[in-house]
Image (spheres, rainbow, N blue to C red):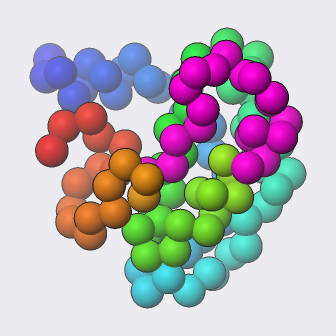
Amino acid sequence: MSEAASIGRMLHGRVFEVTERTAADGKVLVPLDEASVRSAAAAADAAKVEAVAICLLQAFTAPAHERQIAEILRALLPGWRSPPPPTCSPWCGSTSVRWQRSSTRR
């Protein structure tokens, strides 16, 4: 099994989805549902997650939703198992190419 597949299996069940959709051109198609963020935060907290990487599709064109999620998480879970604080994918690299934005390898 490849390292990427192994990491994928390890993370399975530790991916918490939120409701939102942004088009490739940055246009918001579905606004961020803050209730879904609160639900994901509660699930992550219950799972004793130690770090959060926020990775939304098209965030490199419109990072507002990722930033909003990070702010909500910081407000809901102050001092939450930090460091590290929630990390947004555009803060790590805002390059527009075809690979999984949550991938640890390029």
Residue 4 in sight here: yes
- Number of labelled discs? 0
Q: Would residue 59 appear left or right of 2 to someone viewing this image?
A: right
Residue 25: percent from left, percent from top: 43, 86
Question: Which of the 4 image quarters holds residue 29?
Answer: bottom right
Q: Would residue 3 appear left or right of 47 to someone viewing this image?
A: left
Residue 39 in sight here: no
Q: Is residue 8 above or below residue 28?
A: above
Q: Would residue 9 appear left or right of 65 to someone viewing this image?
A: left
Residue drawn at point x = 68 percent, y = 75 percent? 30
Q: Is residue 75 magenta?
A: yes
Q: Is residue 95 magenta?
A: no
Question: Which of the 4 image quarters holds residue 98?
Answer: bottom left
Q: Residue furthest top?
A: 48
Residue drawn at point x = 29 percent, y = 40 percent? 103
Q: Is residue 22 above or below residue 66?
A: below
Residue 89: percent from left, percent from top: 43, 51
Residue drawn at point x = 43 percent, y = 76 percent? 61
Question: Which of the 4 image quarters holds residue 19?
Answer: bottom right
Q: Is residue 25 above or below residue 52?
A: below
Q: Nearer the viewer, residue 49 or 43?
A: 49
| Quadrant in the picture for the N terminus | top left
Residue 71: percent from left, percent from top: 73, 49
Q: Which residues are magenta?
A: 71-89
Residue 49: percent from left, percent from top: 61, 18
Q: Would residue 81 appear left or right of 1 to someone viewing this image?
A: right
| Quadrant in the picture for the C terminus | top left
Residue drawn at point x = 59 percent, y = 37 percent? 86
